Image (cartoon, coloured by chain):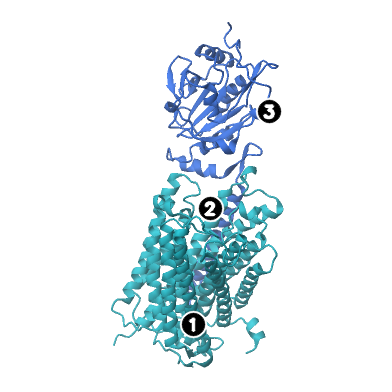
Amino acid sequence: MNLKEWIFTTDHKRVGVLYLIGSMAAFAVAGIMAMLMRIELSTIGPTITANPTQYNVWLYTHGAVMILGFQIPALTGFFANYCIPLMIGAKDVAFPRVNALSVWLFYVGVILALLTFFVPDPPDIMWTGYPPYSTITTGNTALYTFTVLILGFASIIGGVNFLTTVAYMRAPGVTLNKLNIFVWCTLGAFVLQLVFVPVLGTAVTLISMDKYLGTHFFDPANGGDVLTYQNLFWFYSHPAVYVIFLPFIGVVYEVIAAHGKNMVFNYKMVVYGGVGGIVALSGVVWVHHLYVSGMADWLRIGQMITTLMISIPVGLMMIGLIGTLYRSSIAFTTPMLYALGVVFLFLIGGLTGIPLALPALTIGVSDTYYVVGHFHYVMAVAGTFAIFAGVYHWFPKVTGKMYSEFWGKLGFWITFVGVNIVFWIMMDIGVKGMPRRYYDYPHFPQFEAAHQWMTVGAAILGVGFFIAVLNWIMGAKNGKPAGDNPWGSPSLEWSTVSPPPHGNWPTPPSVAEDWHPYGFRKD
Amino acid sequence: MPAGAVTEPTRNSAPDGSVMQIDEPRFLGSRLRGETVLTDVAGNDFRVADLLGKPVILLLSYYGCDGTCPTMNAELAKVLAQVNRFALGKDYRVLTVSFDARDTPTTANTFLAKTGPVPEAMRGGWRHAVVKTGDVKGFAGEVGFNFFWSDAARAFLHPNVLVFLTPEGRVARYIYGTRMDARTVELALVDADWERISSTTAVFDQLTGACFSYNYAEGRYQWNLSLLAGVGSFILGVSLMLLGAGLYRRKMARKLQGEMHA
């Protein structure tokens, strides 16, 4: 393997794999941070650190790296890069060099995030960076700002690239109504990135200006508005939930259709109602993150309604998944297990989110572990399971080899058990009053046993993830040849050899008039 | 005794500069009890709570004042005439209350005669009153307003401030100084009424209100620059998306035309 070729590659598949390697490294770092927090919380009083700021640094790193370094890059970096050109029958993306720049910027962002461990005063401002704390802390707010700006810029140029690619580079016959659901979902995510990332970029730049240049954008004593930051931050960061959700649910569609050998249920409903509805509504629900920050009742009630409304397109997407499963030939392969896991976890996360949409209930559980449990179910864990489902699903295409089903399934079940131990207990003690973001909890001794169970659960799920990653490494090295289309899918990425050569097909592919990426034979 | 004359000053203390300052962090958001009974110039009694339900501009003066109090009242009348967005009486009310326990409806009338009567159009929404029962100092203290008698000046020393109350009677904003302008008053009224959509145009009022933030250090409203920067960047993102979509449509239309010609 020539390292220089990989670093300077403009091949979308290699760029995708670079994204995967970087995001999995980020996932490992974020996981270690989570484990350190869980060990610290396993007893009341100092367990492995007596420094609360150290705990804040772990918390910051875990949140920022999970979202900005792992989930978004894995979904819109690896899957989009690897799969979209193949799914639309293109030989590469529209701007291959811009694509290479995007992955370099991603690595710069990840390195900046990892500098947290080496700078004297690391950022301790969570991934939210709320002022006034972020503007008065001795922690390095600039590192946070530059990490966000670099990763944001990388995602913007990636978004432009993929929208152009899908618009102009589809193979003859691959019409808009024959695009894979994953392609539609990713396009929706990129539209959101392009529209909303500039707002986040502005907000985090202004906090650094307040801190280092003496401006007063968020200083109420001098005419600034501290709540504006929260509004700007969540104006991006709630759509960012859909930037994660859309691609991951797209991956799950691909897996369930291929491993159930079934046509996607009500394709147009999923695309126009589901993806379109989410894109249309995602920018008008951010206020539900601020119910307790102080706002007018009319705004609270208005955004409660929009928040409940967005569950309709999300519900349509879930109906599409369940409908696709109905009367399908389900093969309980590893990717399918992870995909079914996503359906289960997302349902729990989605249903426990409904009370959080209602101000009257949210105020009771705000800033408790209930919220933490909810968003881990709905976004962190469901998203991660989807990434694992996707990596297993396209593993034969990427490597040309097959992973071990035994270790794959074992890893899944271990992870599944661990996840539910951690996050179910989290929601339970949240309802009972355990506040979030606490380094220590001497006033809540009744929750110590629960914290210990969660630490055990975290260790279990860590083992499960470790088995999965090891399975990929061993499969890539020693796996049996997988063949070009082990799942028997008509989707275009399976029509070329595994792994695909540079340019993807020896000759440009063309599709028959009755072709459809989910047109499985029923005989 | 001439109306408004001070015969028995509420003798207090040596001058204390801190009296002129209102502890804003403490009193912003605090709520008037509303049970204080006032008597207006016509001799009618009413409770403070009777005036609530709409934003209220509370002006604490004393009617024997020949300094800033008449100026404040006259200036406020002038500025309110320029406030076009809200109608006095319909959308908000004004209440001038004396903090001098010796003031009566008669002294209030004399004061009005001296400063110029409230313009006809404003009479429905602006009442001048004195505290009938209870503790004047306590009433003023509910909004953090302190005052004291100065033997040297033979006058009360007090802050010159408009107190903006929400419809529920909470303190929403203090605007200081004898010079005021209509935009500041309008924005302070928006701040006082932001929890409600009281009319179909109120949404636009709230939006314009959001574009300004209050600078406590300088005591004035200024553009909310962080919000404008955020909105600007959002508009930039949307514009670039629309530009891209427009270019795509144009190219596709040309391609289609080319195919039809071929």
Label 3 or label 2, whichever lies nearer to me, is: 3
Query: What residue is pinned by disc 1?
Result: A467
Give the SS element for disc 1. Answer: helix
Q: Amino acid at mark 2?
A: Asn
The kind of residue tagged 3 is: Gly
Shade representing chain B: blue
Task: Say whether marks 1 and 2 touch (CB < 8 Å).
Answer: no
Q: Is residue B235 above or below residue B7?
A: below
Q: On the rendered image, what quadrant is the N terminus of chain A found in? A: bottom right
Q: Mark 1 vs mark 3: same chain?
A: no
Residue at image point 40% right, 60% down: A353
Q: What is the distance, in whole Å, between disc 1 and disc 2 at their CAs?
A: 40 Å
Depth check, front residue: B3 or A156:
B3
Where is residue B1? Give x, y as percent: 58, 5
What is the chain letter for disc 3? Answer: B
Q: Quadrant of the C terminus of chain A?
A: bottom left
What residue sits right under mark 3 in the picture? B17
The structure residue drawn at horizontal position 57% and vertical position 37%, both measured from the top left corner, is B26
Q: Which residue is mark 2?
A: A231
Q: CA distance from mark 3 to mark 2?
A: 39 Å
Nearest to the observer: residue A380 or residue A447: A447
Q: Are marks 1 and 2 on the same chain?
A: yes
User: Who's the residue at 52% across and 62% down the image?
Assistant: A44
Rounded to the nearest whole Å, what is the CA distance between mark 1 and mark 3? 72 Å
Chain coloured cyan in the rendered structure:
A
